[in-house]
Image (tube, helix red, strand yellow):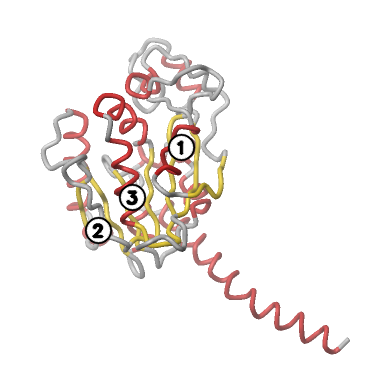
Amino acid sequence: MRNMQKLLTALALCLLPMALLASEQETAIQKAVDGEHRSAENRARDKYRHPRETLEFFGLRPDMTVVEMWPGGGWYTEILAPVVASDGKLYTAQYSANPSAGYQRRYYGAFLTRLGGNPDIYRDVTVTTFYPPYQLEIAPPGSADMVLTFRNLHNWIGDQRKDGVSASLAFRAMYDALKPGGILGITDHRWPEGDGDADPFNSGYMKASEAIALAEAAGFKLVARSEVNANPRDTHDHQEGVWTLPPSLALGEQDREKYLAIGESDRFTLKFVKPAGAAP
């Protein structure tokens, strides 16, 4: 009996650091989500994007080196940056310095304004560039614990169907940046698997199976899926694709209340790992 008590005590002591680490992770993410630096407009999207649950699913910790791909205006950056500010590092792999697309220019400008307007939050964020096929080093090779991409992959796949390389180069860049054992987290607009071919360029939707195939071709291993960003109200058949829905509301006042009631798009959330035995 005494030996059993000793065993249980030893087991409890072993589990205690893991529990404390999980608690620290949850506290840091929730504190960032609740931070006063976040705009009311961005907070309003939490009910669709579930940032705390998504980042906990991916396994974000405050001591990680993280790369955020194409952060746009910085919706997730304002959560990631304070989480890793003290003990980790954040790289943001942005568009080219002079992007050709108008929306990219607007987002890039908003992003730099965000960083410059709150140096206490963003002073240690390093801005890099992902501009395939010319600029692919999103962080020092083998330096990142985690790479995250939110609603970008459909763009790269749309481009790949024209240029043959964009999505594959994105996965190569993310793989090269990660340490062996590092995590890749992907969220994107989901096209139903049984509904024929997706049209990522024009609709924004893509199949999760295509994301998985590209990731596995690059050497990643799928380790988990989550339905945290699923939206069963999304019928996937909108006139202007995902941009029909909030926050874009591409049709303006036409059926506005209908699309607000649907909310943001149905999304898949996938977690991959760079195998531990892989070359750095």
Front residue of 81/224: it is 224
In the rendered image, the vertical position of residue 38 relative to residue 141, given as above or below? above
Front residue of 156/248: it is 156
For residue 174, which numbered disc appears in the image? 3
For residue 221, which numbered disc appears in the image? none
Looking at the image, tell me whether mark 1 or mark 3 is earlier in sequence order.
3
Amino acid carrying label 3: it is Met
For residue 125, which numbered disc appears in the image? 2
Inter-mark Cα distance, 2 to 1: 31 Å
Q: Does dot 3 land on a helix, a strand or a loop? A: helix
Amino acid carrying label 2: it is Val
Q: How crowded is mark 3: few (under 14 residues within 10 Å), some or many (20 or more)?
A: many
> Residue 131's quadrant in the figure?
top left
Q: In this view, does 267 lie to the left or right of 178?
A: right
Amino acid carrying label 1: it is Ala
Q: Does dot 2 land on a helix, a strand or a loop? A: loop
> Residue 171's quadrant in the figure?
top left
